[in-house]
Every structure is written in C-alpha cells, then in structure tokens.
Image: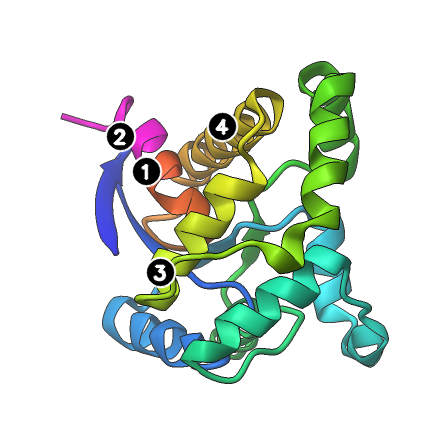
Amino acid sequence: MSSVRINGADVTVIGVLKGLVKEEEKVAKAFTDHTPDAVAISTSKEELAALRAKETHSDYELSTLEEVYKVYMEHFGAVRLPTPAYLKAIELADAAHVPVIPIDLNDEEFTDLYCKRIRGVDMVRESFYTRSIRRRKYRIGSAEEFALDWDKKVNRAKGFRQLEGDREAHMAQTLRNMASKHKRILAFVEFERSAGMERSLKTKKDD
C-alpha cells in the first residue's frame, strides 16, 4: 500500500491478488482506515458491469491459464473468480454511497493496443507457453512472489510487456483525472500491475 498526493487529493493504491478470497479482509480494512469518497478498481468498464451482474458469476468459465493459476494460488488459501477483492470493494463502496470507477482500458482501447503491440511471433510464443503451462515451475514462497513470477513468465514476450505497461500508464492517468473531482481515493489494483502503475502515477505527483 502507498499513498500519493495528486492535485490536492490523497490517492491510496492497494495491490490485490486476483482470486484469493482472503484479500477481502485487506479491502475491508482499507475502507475502515481511509473512508474514501471514491473507489477505483483495475477493471474495464465492461468488466465492472459484469462484476455487478451477480446472477452471471456462476457462469464464469476459467481459461487454461486461469485454471493453472488457481491451482498454484490455492497454496495460499481459497480461490474464487471473479476476484473477491473487487467484489468486496464494490459492495463496500455501494454501501457507503461512493462511486466505483473502472480505471483499466475499455475493450475497444485494449483491442487497439493489442493489435499495435502484439506481433505474430508473440502470439506463437504465447500459444506454446499455454500448451506447456502445466509443466512449468513457479516460485511459491508467498502469494505475492508467485503472482509476480507468474506475470513475468506469462508476459515474457516484449509485446505483452509493452501492453501491460500501456495498461499501467492508462490506469495512472485515469487516477489523475479522478483526483480533480475526489479528495480521498482508494485504488484497488491487481498486484502485478500496482508497482508499475504507482511509478507512472508518481512521475507527475504534486510537490
């Protein structure tokens, strides 16, 4: 967790682990400690709408990558998708009558950047990696260590690394925009993107 002052607003960034149920406790404590007047989560507007449609959660189907991720993350506790930390953030924000803002790229923006960044060779490498994903070994000293190691390996191709960097920069800019309207912002960001997003956010922080 870290706090940055942007345009007179206090922005607190909290990295959350995808799928891990006990991350709900981290979210609840953050609300108690910071009493936000706005909440940001690292989803697209389309993903936020899907998270709010609770009746569809049981229809969520895991991809091959998500199935393997789940197996490893379960070393650290129960895992459920959609990500419990995001669902808890939405629940608490709604109860407190504060807005929830999706800060990630929307589907159209992501598609445009994907076409720009990802080359044919990147797609081929991703396909080979997905096929061998069950034979790979990962660091599992902690949930955070595993998440970072997983991210590093899944996004080892240059194009995918650039795409994740684009996401971080976009999320940081969206938070700057939010800071012009809200004074106490809680941002729940997937752990793997939180450090890069914070670096981008701090490059233009207030003095």
The magenta region covers 198-207
Q: Distance between the residues labelled 4 and 3?
A: 19 Å
Badge 3 amino acid: Glu
Q: Which residue is drawn at 65% across and 60% down?
A: 134
- Kindly report which numbered mark, 3 or 1, lies closer to the viewer in this rendering: 3
Q: Distance between the residues labelled 1 and 2?
A: 6 Å
Give the residue pinned by disc 3. Answer: 144
Q: In which quarter of the image is residue 103?
A: top right
The image position of residue 119, as x and y in percent, is 73, 17
Badge 4 amino acid: Gly
Q: Residues within 10 Å of mark 1 (few under 14, many from 20)?
A: many
Residue 15 seen anywhere in this rendered image of the structure? no
Q: Residue at x 78, y 76 (%)?
A: 57
| Helix, strand or loop under label 3 | helix
Whether pointer 2 and pointer 3 mark residues with C-beta atoms closer than 8 Å, the reply is: no
Choose the circle earlier in sequence order: 2 or 3. 3
